[in-house]
Image (spheres, grey):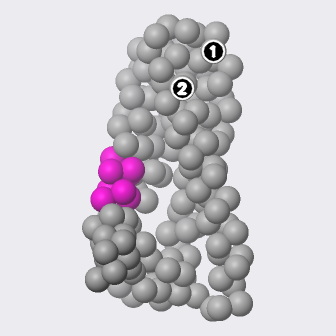
């Protein structure tokens, strides 16, 4: 089994981000506010690192097609769309949640924080599932660079 480095690294960072969010949630419930802030900033940094690696790989190396059985491709595609919707929602809510925390708009931060965290946990779980389906459970499909696709190379 040939597991590619960049997808493995980016998946590591999204899982790390979710773990840090869980730790941050625990810290705030214990009223450890400064530790909560630092942990949530670390979670955001891990999420940004994921995004930088993912976006760079998508642009320069490309997207990997599902290489599993053809009869499962539709289920994978629906699952992938669900994951993309979750991750986009989680990212937007994450930015809002962090922004309100930093700006000390704590009523808004407290309301949206738990929702954001739960969405982020599901984003990480579904992201790991996508990774496993693309690189571990089945042979990877073809990878096509966005640049090649756009330029027709």
Density class for disc 2 (Cα within 10 Å; few <14, some 14-19, many ≥20) is some
Residue furthest front as drawn = 151
Q: Which residue is mark 2?
A: 96
Q: Quadrant of residue 12?
A: bottom left
Which mark, by number, is residue 108? 1
Q: Residues within 10 Å of mark 1 (few under 14, many from 20)?
A: few
* Marked residue nearer the N-terminal end (1 or 2): 2
Total numbered circles: 2
Q: Nearer the viewer, residue 139 or 77?
A: 77
- Answer whether residue 55 is magenta in the image: yes
Please state which of residues 100 and 1 is positioned toward the viewer in this rendering: 100
Q: Residue 143: horizontal and vertical position, in percent?
A: 39, 80
Return the residue nearer the eye: 11 or 54: 54
* Residue 13 drawn above or below residue 9: above
Q: Residue at x 50, y 69 (%)?
A: 131
> Which residue is drawn at the image coordinates 47% and 52% (left, top)?
15
The quarter of the image holding the N terminus is: bottom left
Which quarter shows the C terminus? bottom left
Does residue 147 appear to the left or right of 130 in the view shown?
A: left
> Which element type, helix, strand or loop, lies under badge 1?
helix
Per the image, is 26 magenta?
no
Residue at x-position 41% and y-position 35%: 44
For the record, the magenta segment spans 49-56
Q: Nearer the viewer, residue 24 or 148?
A: 148
Query: Can the viewer see residue 3?
Result: no
Image quarter of residue 3: bottom left
- Asked if labels 2 and 1 touch by Cβ distance under 8 angstroms, the answer is yes
In the depicted structure, whether residue 12 falls above or below residue 2? above
The image position of residue 33, as x and y in percent, is: 47, 13
């Amino acid at each position: 089994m040939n597991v590619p480095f960049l997808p493995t690294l980016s998946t590591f960072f999204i899982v790390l981000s979710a773990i840090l969010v869980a730790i941050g949630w625990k810290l705030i419930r214990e009223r450890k506010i400064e530790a909560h802030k630092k942990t949530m900033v670390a979670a955001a940094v891990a999420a940004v690192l994921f995004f930088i690696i993912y976006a760079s790989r998508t642009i320069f190396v490309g997207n990997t097609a599902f290489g599993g059985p053809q009869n499962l491709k539709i289920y994978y595609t629906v699952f992938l769309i669900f994951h993309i919707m979750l991750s986009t929602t989680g990212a937007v809510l994450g930015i809002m949640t962090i922004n309100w925390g930093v700006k000390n708009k704590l009523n808004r931060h407290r309301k949206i924080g738990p929702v954001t965290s739960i969405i982020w946990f599901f984003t990480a779980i579904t992201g790991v599932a996508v990774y496993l389906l693309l690189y571990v459970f089945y042979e990877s499909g073809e990878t096509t660079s966005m640049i090649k696709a756009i330029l027709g190379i």
